[in-house]
Protein backbone atom coordinates (compact mmCIF):
# COMPACT_ATOMS: atom_id res chain seq x y z
CA UNK A 1 0.00 0.00 0.00
CA UNK A 2 1.49 3.30 -1.12
CA UNK A 3 0.50 5.45 1.85
CA UNK A 4 1.46 2.78 4.33
CA UNK A 5 4.94 2.60 2.79
CA UNK A 6 5.28 6.37 3.40
CA UNK A 7 4.26 6.04 7.04
CA UNK A 8 7.77 6.37 8.45
CA UNK A 9 8.58 9.38 6.25
CA UNK A 10 5.40 11.21 7.23
CA UNK A 11 5.73 10.42 10.93
CA UNK A 12 9.38 11.55 10.91
CA UNK A 13 8.67 14.78 9.03
CA UNK A 14 9.96 17.81 10.93
CA UNK A 15 8.71 20.97 9.30
CA UNK A 16 10.54 23.16 11.83
CA UNK A 17 13.84 21.90 10.42
CA UNK A 18 12.57 22.54 6.91
CA UNK A 19 11.59 26.09 7.82
CA UNK A 20 15.09 26.79 9.14
CA UNK A 21 16.51 25.93 5.71
CA UNK A 22 13.83 27.72 3.69
CA UNK A 23 14.75 30.90 1.84
CA UNK A 24 11.12 32.06 1.97
CA UNK A 25 9.47 30.59 5.12
CA UNK A 26 6.02 31.95 4.22
CA UNK A 27 6.00 30.23 0.83
CA UNK A 28 7.49 27.10 2.39
CA UNK A 29 4.69 26.92 4.95
CA UNK A 30 2.02 27.47 2.27
CA UNK A 31 3.49 24.72 0.07
CA UNK A 32 4.03 22.31 2.97
CA UNK A 33 0.50 22.98 4.18
CA UNK A 34 -0.91 22.16 0.74
CA UNK A 35 1.15 18.96 0.63
CA UNK A 36 -0.05 17.94 4.09
CA UNK A 37 -3.68 18.56 3.17
CA UNK A 38 -3.24 16.41 0.08
CA UNK A 39 -1.60 13.69 2.17
CA UNK A 40 -4.35 13.96 4.78
CA UNK A 41 -7.06 13.44 2.19
CA UNK A 42 -5.26 10.35 0.86
CA UNK A 43 -4.53 9.04 4.35
CA UNK A 44 -8.17 9.40 5.41
CA UNK A 45 -9.30 7.47 2.35
CA UNK A 46 -6.73 4.75 2.99
CA UNK A 47 -7.51 4.74 6.72
CA UNK A 48 -11.19 4.18 6.06
CA UNK A 49 -10.34 1.19 3.88
CA UNK A 50 -7.88 -0.22 6.44
CA UNK A 51 -10.38 0.18 9.28
CA UNK A 52 -12.98 -1.61 7.15
CA UNK A 53 -10.44 -4.43 6.58
CA UNK A 54 -9.78 -4.57 10.32
CA UNK A 55 -13.47 -4.83 11.14
CA UNK A 56 -14.01 -7.52 8.50
CA UNK A 57 -11.04 -9.54 9.77
CA UNK A 58 -12.30 -9.19 13.35
CA UNK A 59 -15.76 -10.29 12.33
CA UNK A 60 -14.43 -13.40 10.56
CA UNK A 61 -12.23 -14.22 13.56
CA UNK A 62 -15.18 -13.82 15.93
CA UNK A 63 -17.36 -15.98 13.68
CA UNK A 64 -14.67 -18.67 13.66
CA UNK A 65 -14.41 -18.55 17.47
CA UNK A 66 -18.18 -18.76 17.74
CA UNK A 67 -18.29 -21.74 15.37
CA UNK A 68 -15.53 -23.52 17.32
CA UNK A 69 -17.42 -22.99 20.57
CA UNK A 70 -20.54 -24.41 18.91
CA UNK A 71 -18.66 -27.52 17.68
CA UNK A 72 -17.25 -28.01 21.16
CA UNK A 73 -20.70 -27.67 22.69
CA UNK A 74 -22.21 -30.20 20.22
CA UNK A 75 -19.37 -32.63 20.85
CA UNK A 76 -20.07 -32.51 24.56
CA UNK A 77 -23.76 -33.13 23.96
CA UNK A 78 -22.94 -36.05 21.67
CA UNK A 79 -20.65 -37.58 24.32
CA UNK A 80 -23.35 -37.09 26.93
CA UNK A 81 -25.79 -38.85 24.64
CA UNK A 82 -23.33 -41.75 24.12
CA UNK A 83 -22.80 -40.89 20.43
CA UNK A 84 -19.03 -40.96 20.20
CA UNK A 85 -19.10 -40.99 16.39
CA UNK A 86 -21.02 -37.74 16.27
CA UNK A 87 -18.71 -36.31 18.89
CA UNK A 88 -15.70 -37.20 16.74
CA UNK A 89 -17.21 -35.36 13.74
CA UNK A 90 -17.86 -32.22 15.80
CA UNK A 91 -14.33 -32.33 17.24
CA UNK A 92 -12.87 -32.84 13.76
CA UNK A 93 -14.75 -29.79 12.52
CA UNK A 94 -13.49 -27.84 15.51
CA UNK A 95 -9.92 -28.85 14.64
CA UNK A 96 -10.36 -27.62 11.07
CA UNK A 97 -11.77 -24.35 12.37
CA UNK A 98 -8.78 -24.01 14.71
CA UNK A 99 -6.43 -24.21 11.75
CA UNK A 100 -8.50 -21.59 9.89
CA UNK A 101 -8.49 -19.45 13.00
CA UNK A 102 -4.67 -19.27 12.97
CA UNK A 103 -4.72 -17.70 9.52
CA UNK A 104 -7.67 -15.46 10.43
CA UNK A 105 -5.92 -14.26 13.57
CA UNK A 106 -2.72 -13.48 11.65
CA UNK A 107 -4.73 -11.52 9.08
CA UNK A 108 -6.60 -9.68 11.81
CA UNK A 109 -3.36 -8.73 13.63
CA UNK A 110 -1.91 -7.38 10.37
CA UNK A 111 -5.08 -5.35 9.71
CA UNK A 112 -5.05 -4.11 13.31
CA UNK A 113 -1.44 -2.95 13.00
CA UNK A 114 -2.13 -1.21 9.70
CA UNK A 115 -5.20 0.42 11.19
CA UNK A 116 -3.18 1.67 14.15
CA UNK A 117 -0.52 3.13 11.85
CA UNK A 118 -3.11 4.82 9.69
CA UNK A 119 -4.90 6.29 12.71
CA UNK A 120 -1.59 7.57 14.08
CA UNK A 121 -0.64 9.01 10.71
CA UNK A 122 -3.99 10.75 10.41
CA UNK A 123 -3.60 12.20 13.91
CA UNK A 124 -0.03 13.32 13.16
CA UNK A 125 -1.05 15.03 9.94
CA UNK A 126 -4.01 16.76 11.58
CA UNK A 127 -1.78 18.04 14.40
CA UNK A 128 0.88 19.22 11.93
CA UNK A 129 -1.73 21.03 9.86
CA UNK A 130 -3.19 22.73 12.94
CA UNK A 131 0.27 23.78 14.12
CA UNK A 132 1.24 24.97 10.65
CA UNK A 133 -1.90 27.07 10.36
CA UNK A 134 -1.01 28.74 13.64
CA UNK A 135 2.56 29.32 12.49
CA UNK A 136 1.30 30.54 9.13
CA UNK A 137 -0.67 33.39 10.69
CA UNK A 138 2.10 34.23 13.16
CA UNK A 139 4.76 34.22 10.47
CA UNK A 140 2.71 36.37 8.12
CA UNK A 141 2.15 38.84 10.95
CA UNK A 142 5.90 38.94 11.64
CA UNK A 143 6.62 39.42 7.95
CA UNK A 144 4.16 42.32 7.83
CA UNK A 145 5.92 43.95 10.80
CA UNK A 146 9.30 43.38 9.15
CA UNK A 147 8.09 44.97 5.89
CA UNK A 148 6.71 47.95 7.80
CA UNK A 149 10.00 48.44 9.65
CA UNK A 150 11.89 48.14 6.39
CA UNK A 151 9.78 50.87 4.79
CA UNK A 152 10.18 53.06 7.89
CA UNK A 153 13.95 52.60 7.75
CA UNK A 154 13.94 53.54 4.07
CA UNK A 155 11.88 56.63 4.81
CA UNK A 156 14.22 57.48 7.69
CA UNK A 157 17.23 57.17 5.40
CA UNK A 158 15.56 59.43 2.86
CA UNK A 159 14.76 61.95 5.58
CA UNK A 160 18.38 61.93 6.70
CA UNK A 161 19.50 62.49 3.13
CA UNK A 162 17.06 65.36 2.74
CA UNK A 163 18.33 66.85 6.00
CA UNK A 164 21.91 66.65 4.79
CA UNK A 165 20.96 68.30 1.52
CA UNK A 166 19.11 71.03 3.44
CA UNK A 167 22.17 71.65 5.60
CA UNK A 168 24.32 71.95 2.48
CA UNK A 169 21.84 74.39 0.99
CA UNK A 170 21.92 76.49 4.13
CA UNK A 171 25.69 76.60 4.01
CA UNK A 172 25.56 77.70 0.38
CA UNK A 173 22.99 80.33 1.29
CA UNK A 174 25.21 81.62 4.08
CA UNK A 175 28.15 81.77 1.70
CA UNK A 176 26.13 83.73 -0.85
CA UNK A 177 24.91 86.09 1.86
CA UNK A 178 28.52 86.61 2.94
CA UNK A 179 29.58 87.41 -0.61
CA UNK A 180 26.68 89.83 -0.96
CA UNK A 181 27.57 91.56 2.31
CA UNK A 182 31.18 91.93 1.21
CA UNK A 183 30.09 93.39 -2.14
CA UNK A 184 27.78 95.87 -0.39
CA UNK A 185 30.58 96.86 1.96
CA UNK A 186 32.98 97.40 -0.92
CA UNK A 187 30.42 99.49 -2.75
CA UNK A 188 29.89 101.58 0.33
CA UNK A 189 33.62 102.06 0.77
CA UNK A 190 34.00 103.12 -2.85
CA UNK A 191 31.13 105.53 -2.57
CA UNK A 192 32.62 107.06 0.62
CA UNK A 193 36.02 107.52 -1.09
CA UNK A 194 34.49 109.32 -4.07
CA UNK A 195 32.59 111.66 -1.75
CA UNK A 196 35.78 112.45 0.16
CA UNK A 197 37.69 113.28 -3.05
CA UNK A 198 34.97 115.61 -4.29
CA UNK A 199 34.78 117.37 -0.96
CA UNK A 200 38.52 118.00 -0.97
CA UNK A 201 38.38 119.31 -4.52
CA UNK A 202 35.48 121.58 -3.66
CA UNK A 203 37.42 122.88 -0.66
CA UNK A 204 40.40 123.78 -2.84
CA UNK A 205 38.24 125.76 -5.19
CA UNK A 206 36.45 127.36 -2.28
CA UNK A 207 39.83 128.61 -0.99
CA UNK A 208 40.59 130.06 -4.41
CA UNK A 209 37.28 131.88 -4.41
CA UNK A 210 37.99 133.23 -0.95
CA UNK A 211 41.48 134.51 -1.99
CA UNK A 212 40.01 136.22 -5.06
CA UNK A 213 37.40 138.02 -2.97
CA UNK A 214 40.07 139.27 -0.55
CA UNK A 215 42.26 140.58 -3.36
CA UNK A 216 39.32 142.40 -4.95
CA UNK A 217 38.35 143.94 -1.66
CA UNK A 218 41.95 145.05 -1.00
CA UNK A 219 42.22 146.70 -4.44
CA UNK A 220 38.98 148.56 -3.85
CA UNK A 221 40.19 149.73 -0.48
CA UNK A 222 43.45 151.07 -1.96
CA UNK A 223 41.63 152.86 -4.73
CA UNK A 224 39.40 154.54 -2.21
CA UNK A 225 42.42 155.71 -0.21
CA UNK A 226 44.17 156.95 -3.35
CA UNK A 227 46.86 154.44 -3.09
CA UNK A 228 48.31 152.73 -6.08
CA UNK A 229 47.83 148.99 -6.48
CA UNK A 230 51.59 148.64 -6.52
CA UNK A 231 51.63 149.52 -2.85
CA UNK A 232 52.79 153.27 -3.06
CA UNK A 233 50.79 156.54 -2.28
Image (cartoon, helix red, strand yellow):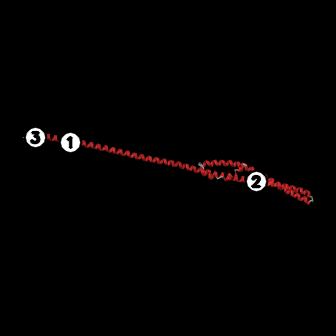
**Residue drawn at the location 51% of the way across and 49% of the way down:** 153
Direction from residue 28 to residue 121 in the image, left or right: right
Separation of disc 1 and disc 3 at Cα? 27 Å
Q: Secondary structure at mark 1?
A: helix
User: Which residue is denoted by mark 3 in the rendering?
Assistant: 222
The residue carrying pointer 3 sits among few (fewer than 14), some (14 to 19) or many (20 or more) residues within 10 Å by Cα, namely some
Q: Secondary structure at mark 3?
A: helix
Mark closest to the chain's N terminus, 1 or 2: 2
Count of marks overlaid on the render: 3
For this orientation, the residue located farthest to the bottom is 80
Direction from residue 39 to residue 163 in the image, left or right: left
Separation of disc 3 and disc 2 at Cα? 165 Å
Query: How far from the left and from the top, in percent, is residue 221?
Result: 11, 41
Quick check: can you spot residue 63? no
Query: How far from the left and from the top, in percent, is residue 171?
Result: 40, 47
What numbered label is drawn on residue 204? Answer: 1
Q: Secondary structure at mark 2?
A: helix
Mark closest to the chain's N terminus, 1 or 3: 1
Direction from residue 41 to residue 100 in the image, left or right: right
Of badges 1 and 2, the one in the foreground is 2
User: Which residue is denoted by mark 2 in the rendering?
Assistant: 110
Of badges 1 and 3, the one in the foreground is 1
The residue carrying pointer 1 sits among few (fewer than 14), some (14 to 19) or many (20 or more) residues within 10 Å by Cα, namely few
Separation of disc 1 and disc 2 at Cα? 138 Å
- Please report contact status of discs 3 and 2: CB closer than 8 Å, yes or no: no
**Residue drawn at the location 23% of the way across and 43% of the way down:** 200
Query: How far from the left and from the top, in percent, is residue 119?
Result: 72, 53
**Residue drawn at the location 31% of the way across and 44% of the way down:** 186
Amino acid sequence: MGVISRFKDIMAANFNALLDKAEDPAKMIDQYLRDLNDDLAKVKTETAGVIADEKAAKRKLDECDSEMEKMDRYARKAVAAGNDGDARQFLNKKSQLAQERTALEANYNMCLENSYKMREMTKKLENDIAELKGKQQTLKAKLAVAETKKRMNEVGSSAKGAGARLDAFKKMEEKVDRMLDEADAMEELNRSSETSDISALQASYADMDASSDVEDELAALKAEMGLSTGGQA
